[in-house]
Image (cartoon, rainbow, N blue to C red):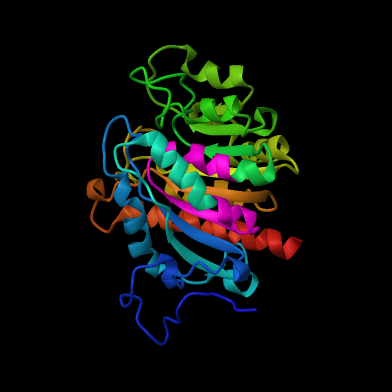
């Protein structure tokens, strides 16, 4: 079996070479892969800022700083996973439903091959075609959503498909099992008191940032794990879950969020979940600060997600 891992940075410097995620090979050999990094450069579903189409490029570029061992989890990722950078799925700029069809078609063979995709977004609207592709193979999924917005409006600007309606559509299409799903980190101003209740009406558990501050991270993680149980799970991480002091390069910023360190704690607490797909979305490099801090955060989120996939494989 061919195994894929990053280039050796003791032999060639990390600033050299084509910008793939963590310097992984850019191949589409699904027969010899356990996980695949996939870009979804799409931002037609965004309601405020545009520019998330450049998110995958920004994340890949700064990901060259990452090394293969996760000391907090004690996992040498590429001893347990063969990982490829699959490239980007095709999109149709300006046309959301056509892009949905293209994204789902691009991800379908990855799921069919039993490979776990880690998708780099892209605005959060891409989660709907991601879930379509995943649920077609795995059935209705448990959702773990780390985000400052619930994204369960019925419509935005009178339109049913955008980054603010994605998880309502996913429930309506039978892609999610709301009884095993949980949304974590909601905060910020709302249009009306029913904005968050819409998620609960759909059957989701939902914990606001205020609620987490009272519960604590450890108790919140326990609630996530209890909710998901042994269900097959999809983890969706919107970088606006993190405070804009740590992630300014995003589309719809909300103050009062979590630190990058706290984000790591949430993700590491998900070890053992049966993750069949995941994403990190809403990275807008042109709004980032010096040092590409938002792209760096997103790259590390993807690194933690890869670690979770490796840990699950170790556990069997």
Q: Position of residue 4 (x, y in %)?
A: 54, 75
Q: Residue at x 58, y 72 (%)?
A: 78
Nearer to us in this view, 231 or 130: 130
Residue 66 location, quadrant: bottom left
- Considering every residue shown, the one lying at the far bottom of the view is 11
The residue located at (33%, 40%) in the rendering is 43
- Percent across and percent down for residue 306 are 56, 60
Percent across and percent down for residue 87 are: 42, 61
> In the rendered image, which quarter is residue 233 located in?
top right
Magenta-drawn stretch contains 273: no
Q: Is residue 257 visible?
A: no
Q: Residue at x 42, y 45 (%)?
A: 281
Quadrant of image for the C terminus: bottom right
Task: Check the image and report above or below for 71 versus 281.
Answer: below
Residue 148: x and y in percent read: 44, 33
Q: Foreground: 130 or 150? A: 130
Q: Is residue 236 left or right of residue 308?
A: left
- Quick check: is 128 in the magenta stretch? yes
| The N terminus sits in image quarter | bottom right
Q: Please, is residue 1 above or below residue 113 in the view?
A: below
**Left/right of residue 265 with respect to residue 224 in the rendered view:** left
Q: Nearer the viewer, residue 246 or 158?
A: 158
Residue 304 at least partly seen: yes
- Residue beneath the point at 35% across and 54% down: 295
In this rendering, would 139 be left or right of 212? right
**In the image, is 35 to the left or to the right of 53?**
right
Q: Which of 102 and 121 is in front in this view?
A: 102
The stretch of residues the image draws in magenta is 108-133
Disc tally is 0
- Give residue 8's quadrant in the image: bottom left
């Amino acid at each position: 079996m061919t195994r894929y891992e990053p280039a050796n940075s003791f032999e060639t410097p990390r600033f050299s070479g084509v910008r793939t995620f963590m310097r992984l090979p850019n191949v589409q050999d699904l027969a010899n892969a356990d996980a695949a990094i996939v870009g979804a450069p799409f931002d037609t579903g965004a309601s405020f800022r545009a520019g998330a189409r450049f998110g995958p490029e920004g994340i890949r570029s700064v990901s060259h700083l990452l090394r293969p061992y996760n000391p907090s989890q004690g996992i040498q990722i590429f001893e347990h996973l063969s990982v490829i950078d699959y490239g980007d799925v095709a999109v149709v700029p300006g046309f959301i439903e056509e892009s949905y069809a293209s994204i789902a078609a691009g991800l379908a063979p990855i799921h069919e091959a039993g490979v776990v995709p880690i998708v780099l977004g892209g605005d959060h609207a891409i989660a709907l075609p991601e879930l379509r592709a995943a649920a077609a193979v795995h059935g209705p999924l448990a959702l773990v959503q780390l985000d400052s917005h619930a994204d369960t409006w019925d419509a935005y600007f009178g339109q049913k498909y955008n980054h603010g309606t994605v998880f309502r559509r996913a429930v309506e299409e039978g892609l999610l099992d709301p009884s095993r799903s949980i949304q974590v980190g909601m905060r910020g101003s709302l249009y009306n008191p029913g904005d968050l209740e819409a998620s609960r009406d759909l059957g989701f558990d939902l914990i606001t940032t205020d609620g987490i501050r009272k519960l604590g991270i450890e108790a919140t993680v326990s609630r996530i794990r209890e909710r998901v149980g042994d269900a097959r799970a999809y983890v969706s991480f919107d970088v606006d879950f993190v405070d804009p002091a740590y992630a300014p390069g995003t589309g719809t910023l909300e103050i009062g969020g979590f630190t990058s360190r706290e984000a790591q704690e949430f993700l590491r607490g998900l070890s053992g979940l049966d993750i069949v797909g995941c994403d990190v979305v809403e990275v807008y490099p042109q709004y980032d600060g010096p040092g590409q801090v938002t792209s760096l955060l997103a790259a590390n989120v993807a690194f933690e997600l890869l670690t979770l996939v490796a840990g699950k494989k170790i556990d069997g």
